[in-house]
Amino acid sequence: MSLIEQAARALVKERSGDDAWNGLDIELQEQLRAEVRAVIKALREPTEDMSLAGEQTLQRWGHAADDDEAVATWSAMVDVLLTTGGATG
């Protein structure tokens, strides 16, 4: 199951109180996936605090990275999620 679908299922559970995903029609499932994608697109550009945290994490692992590289890494990861749906495996 892709990360997009996992998030859409979580959205259904949050809204309804139970895991009703399998009972939804295909159009509603796709609408929920689209809503998830819209939220992820809005998160594509990290905040300054996020980019600093990314920079510090990379540096702790021995990479000579700056916040621009952390932002580029985050954005690339989000782009893959949006392109592939975050398919696992």
Image (tube, helix red, strand yellow):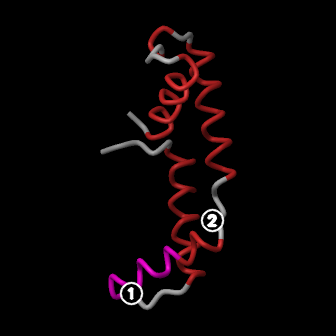
Question: What is the secondary structure assignment of the residue under circle 1?
Answer: loop
Q: Is residue 44 above or below residue 22?
A: below
Q: Earlier in the sequence, mark 2 or mark 1?
A: 2
> Label 1 crowding class (10 Å Cα cut-off): few <14, some 14-19, many 20+?
few
Q: Look at the magenta stretch and give its main secondary structure.
A: helix
Residue 61 picture quarter: bottom left
Which segment did they paint magenta?
53-63
Query: Considering only vertical position in the picture, is 22 above or below 63?
Result: above
Which mark, residue 51? none
Residue at 49% across / 74% down in the picture?
Answer: 54
Mark 2 surroundings: few (<14), some (14-19) or many (≥20) residues within 10 A: some
**Residue 6's x, y, as percent?**
44, 34
Residue 87, position as x, y percentages in the image: 41, 42
Q: Quadrant of the C terminus?
A: top left
Residue holding disc 1: 63
Number of marks in the rendered image? 2
Q: Which residue is mark 2?
A: 46
Element assignment for label 2 = loop
- Camera-near label (2 vs 1) is 2
